[in-house]
Image: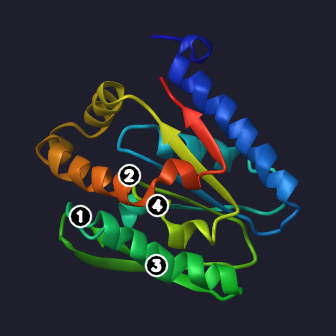
Amino acid sequence: MHSRSDDPVATALDRAATLIAQDVVALSAANPVVLIDGQSGAGKSSLAARLASRWPLAGRVQLIALDSLYPGWDGLDAGVERALDGVLRPHGRGYLGTWQRWDWMRETEAESHAVDPSLGVIVEGSGLLTPSTSALGDVRVWVESAETARKARALARDGETYCPHWDRWAAQEKIHVERDDPRALATRVVDVP
């Protein structure tokens, strides 16, 4: 077992979370929106959790994973639209937002969750940085990592559940990257080994 200090992935994510926290402070906004995008296994969820744990502003931050919004294995774009309509647009207008969790086991909608417009929000997930969403994100992060490393991490994390769907999901991510150029929309690019 490696200690965290000699784990290059943990080191990169810790450094990135510190820099993004500084970006949040520099905004001088009470309720900033941080968007974190990257392909599967890049480190988005880990980065978002690190940022949430060291959120630099008063009050709590709301952390929303698109994994809870995608309506199934073919739903990358639909999940992003759900975040746009239920979270980002209402938050940007100062309205209470709501999103409904997708129950992957039952393949149906589950409970609803409210999004307080007076608090900051971190939204993370594949496909997130698009021209529409980036207009509503104060800090926009693209997490870059090589496919072999990403695939190894994703399958170690989700194993048998994800393995049969890797290619199907990767094809949707490829379309997103080619169509939306999320790296160009980012205010910060994070390289993860």
Residue 128 has which mark? 4
Q: Earlier in the sequence, mark 2 or mark 3?
A: 3
- Label count reads 4
Residue shown at the point (38%, 28%) measured from the top left = 146
Q: Which residue is identified by label 2?
A: 177
What secondary structure is marked by label 2?
Answer: helix
Q: Is residue 21 left or right of residue 185?
A: right
Residue shown at the point (40%, 58%) measured from the top left = 127
Using the image as rendered, state which of residue 177 and residue 105 is in the foreground: 177
The picture places residue 10, in percent across and down from the top left corner, at 56, 25
Q: Amino acid at mark 4?
A: Leu
Q: Earlier in the sequence, mark 4 or mark 3?
A: 3
Q: Earlier in the sequence, mark 2 or mark 4?
A: 4
Closer to the camera: disc 2 or disc 4?
2
Q: Alpha carbon of mark 2 to alpha carbon of mark 4: how far?
A: 10 Å
Q: Earlier in the sequence, mark 1 or mark 4?
A: 1
Q: Amino acid at mark 1?
A: Trp
Q: Alpha carbon of mark 4 to alpha carbon of mark 3: how far?
A: 15 Å
Closer to the camera: disc 2 or disc 3?
2
Residue 99 has which mark? 3
What secondary structure is marked by label 4?
Answer: loop
Q: Alpha carbon of mark 2 to alpha carbon of mark 3: how far?
A: 25 Å
Tell me the quarter of the picture where residue 154 sits: top left
